[in-house]
Image: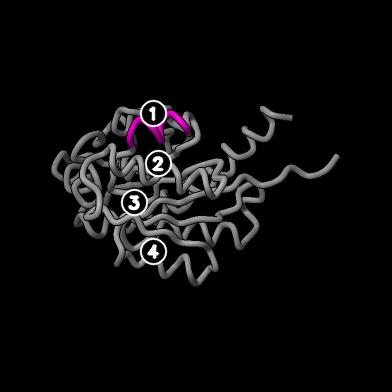
Amino acid sequence: MNAAVPKRIAVLVSGGGTNLQALLDAASRGLMPHADIVLVVSSCKDAFAIERAKKANVKTEVLDTSQYFGVNAYDNALLPVLLENKIDIVVLAGFLVIIGKKVLGAYKDRIINVHPSLIPSFCGDGYYGLFVHEAALKRGVKVTGATVHLVNEITDGGKILLQKSVGIKENDTPEILQRRVMEQAEWIILPEALELICKEEVRSYE
């Protein structure tokens, strides 16, 4: 039997692209044989993630949010880009734009997101970036972590694929905690979850 063709992956970014880099590194180490990152879409023309993609020889596309007014307008711009590039699975990696109904409908159960907490804690509208870690420290929890989940119309509300916990230390700041969660959880489970969903899709169509 011939080996399954890897799924074509688009990674959507808005900033520095550390999670994108984790995916690219995992791919270079052969940890995602069923996934082929072929496109990076940025919502910001100055995002450093674009440079990471170019260095890895991955095609880039900029759909700057300043050029679009509202979720529907952005959706109408994003979907053709995904379809033209024959994208199978979409990864949100620090993407600070709401995904609209058209893209959600076209890619049902084929969009994943990484969130820097153990959902259902510290998630939903308003919980992103350092705000998540500030909330965890303010609450005084002893353990936090990261979650990779499917994306639906509810913010952070899709089916959980993988989670990994990270301990909180006494003198943590939001910045220190953010870095530990990335290194010990996000950068590990995001490539694992992507490979998992790619393999599951391959199996479902065999």
User: Label 2, on which residue?
Assistant: 113
Amino acid bearing label 2: Asn
Determine the CA span between mark 2 and mark 4: 16 Å
Q: Among all residues in the image, which is located at the extreme left?
A: 138
Determine the CA span between mark 1 and mark 3: 16 Å
What SS does tag 3 mark?
A: loop
What SS does tag 2 mark?
A: strand
Q: Position of residue 49 (x, y in %)?
A: 38, 63
Q: Earlier in the sequence, mark 3 or mark 2?
A: 3
Determine the CA span between mark 4 and mark 1: 25 Å
Residue stretch rendered in magenta on the structure: 100-106
Question: Are circles 4 and 3 on residues that touch, CB within 8 Å?
Answer: yes
Q: Earlier in the sequence, mark 1 or mark 3?
A: 3
User: Label 4, on which residue?
Assistant: 49
Q: Which mark is residue 158?
A: 1
Q: Position of residue 4 (x, y in %)?
A: 74, 42
Amino acid bearing label 1: Gly
Q: Earlier in the sequence, mark 1 or mark 2?
A: 2
Please report the residue visible at 43 percent of the width from the left and 27 percent of the height from the top.
159
* Res 43 quadrant in image: bottom left
What SS does tag 1 mark?
A: loop
Magenta: main secondary structure equals: helix
Instruction: Inspect the magenta stretch and tell me whether residue 6 lies in it.
Output: no
Q: Earlier in the sequence, mark 4 or mark 3?
A: 4
Determine the CA span between mark 1 and mark 2: 9 Å
Within-10-Å neighbours for mark 1: few <14, some 14–19, many 20+: some
Q: Position of residue 193 (x, y in %)?
A: 52, 41
Front disc: 2 or 4: 4
Amino acid bearing label 4: Ala
Q: Earlier in the sequence, mark 2 or mark 4?
A: 4
User: Label 3, on which residue?
Assistant: 94
